[in-house]
Image (spheres, rainbow, N blue to C red):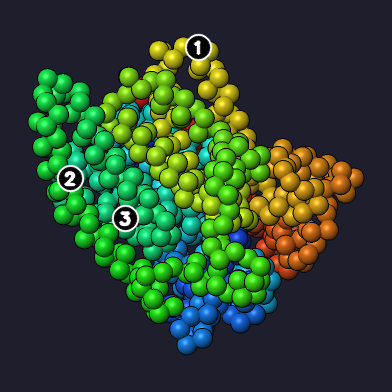
Amino acid sequence: MTSRLSQWLRDPLFLLCLTAGLLAFVVQSGELGTADTMHRLQTTHWLWTAEPQVFPNEYPEFGAHGRGGRLYSTYGIGQSLLMLPADLLGTWIAHWPIFSGYSDEPAVRSIVVSYSTSILVNILTALIAFRLLCQLRFGVKESVAGVLALMFCTTHLHYTQNLMENNYIMLLTLTGFSFQYEWLRADSRRALFIGSCALGLNLLTRLTTGLDLIAAGIFVLLTLWFEGARSERTRSEGARGRPLWRRFIAYCKVAAPVYLMFLLLDRAYQFYRFGSFTNTYVAYYASEIRQRDPTLPANFPWNGPFHVGFFGALFQPEKSIFLFDPLLVLAIFLLAWLWKRLTPELRAYGTAFVLLLLGYICFYARYAYWSGDFAWGDRYVSTAVELVALVAVPLLIRYREPLGRTIWRAAWALIVASLIVQLASLAFWLPLEIYQMETFGHPTFVIALRFKNIVAFALGKMDAWGLNTDAMGWDAWDYVHITTWNFLPFLLRRVGAAPAWVVNSVLAIWIAAVAALGAVLLRLRSNLRTAA
């Protein structure tokens, strides 16, 4: 047993997964993050209990009337299915006699769901991201560095703490790309089927992930095209196009039926709720909103100016993808600067995901809530941003010599800045600055405001610096949540519902987990240096 443990502690992949699990553990608050996830968890509960998808008191803030006049959730069922095992476990644990006197938030059920689901998704994401980077011919050191940068230096970290659907979508997209790329190399129909199922499953979570399916197909085709351009320069375009066409047909024979199956499942769920196969919940949501506010235009919620949503996602200080994910700047620069040196698969990867990012920005540009509303950054496009950023650090390490010292130093400054931004995102619950902007107005440089909040709270200067606003007190629980560090031990202490021994025990476990995370990172660094 000792020798096996010693062997595991020398395995970079095991240490990487352990890092992912510990990271997800220490950043949890015990809360689900947003009302959206709470609504999705209620749909999970509806799957196996007699409770409704939407309670009457939640309307009109949430839900839409569907078949039989009943209220239904207006979200896809994908994340609800993901949380089903955790909901079963959490509900069972919540009924233990030891918790009979505890009924406050964060609830036992939400603690179990948030911890178990986030840890599972984070570990699986580390595994599949490492697998894909190795498939793209990065070395072990480069691949580990890329995964660590993804987990610590992109908004993936924020959504590890706040259980929205983003990280689940990213996991499925990475899985789809990895296994479809395996089919491209090994001609394995099984791998293509698995990859297509992962991408198809995304449709049950958010129907707009159909863009991810398209991006995967573009990735496969571009890889074949770039390889053909490199190895068959002497052949005619027609000679190169014929094998490309045959691979495309083979791809469609497996992928298309799988995608169709998941699309039909989504449509069946839509029909069950709203009696229609052809529209989405947005139509019902918009109809009910217009009934309450007849002044809204007929094309609501797709009535926003395109330029506002498009340039807002890029440059607005409250939502800019370059501010909330600085690593994206490095990734785009390196992909452009090193283009002629890149392998065909890396060119295809960079092109496919940059196009996916632009596709999401354009799709949501006219949406009334293009910014994702209550979210850290622009949550509708953040997953695509993270997928582009995944290759930034591996490219930096691989091409250190040709890039030169100046670019190397500037790149590391950007990486450190990315890390600091993501760590700051964990400090408080995400609505804090949104509530403050009700008083401060727009535009507001949210990240700078977050750092100001951190310093003010640490020094006890929130009132003195004018950071406690009226909007923060609109909801009693929200006020409690946003006026404490957003980690479970501190939230439990702030709520005051749990016994002191429980709070102290949770704090001790949290400190031990933080120490363990640091120790594992040091061990991983040492192993990689030895291997190098």
Instruction: Pick the residue in front: 529 or 49.
Output: 49
- Residue 60 on image: x %, y %: 63, 75
Q: Residue at x 18, y 49 (%)?
A: 251
Kind of residue at badge 3? Ala
Looking at the picture, which amino acid does disc 1 mark?
Answer: Arg
**Mark number displayed over residue 248:** 2
Q: Position of residue 105 (x, y in %)?
A: 67, 68
Residue carrying label 3: 198
Residue 186 or residue 270, whichever sits in front: 270
Counting the numbered discs, the total is: 3
Query: In the image as oriented, which residue stretches furthest toward the bottom?
Result: 68
Q: Which residue is mark 1?
A: 405
Name the kind of residue labelled 2 in the image. Answer: Phe
| Residue at x 72% of width, y 62% of height | 478
- Mark closer to the chain start, 3 or 1: 3
Dot 2 alpha-carbon crowd within 10 angstroms: few under 14, some 14 to 19, many 20 or more: some
Q: Classify 210 as above or below 174.
A: below
Asked if the residue under mark 1 is in contact with the one under mark 3, i.e. CB atoms within 8 Å, the reply is: no
- The residue shown at (54%, 23%) is 412
* Residue 399 as seen in the image, left or right of residue 423: left
| Earlier sequence position, callout 1 versus callout 2 | 2
Label 3 – label 1 distance at C-alpha: 41 Å
Q: What distance separates the C-alpha of mark 3 from that of mark 2?
A: 19 Å
Rendering coords of residue 411 (x, y %): 52, 22
Is residue 192 visible from the viewing direction of this image?
yes
Above or below: residue 46 compared with residue 415: below
| Quadrant of the drawing holding the C terminus | top left
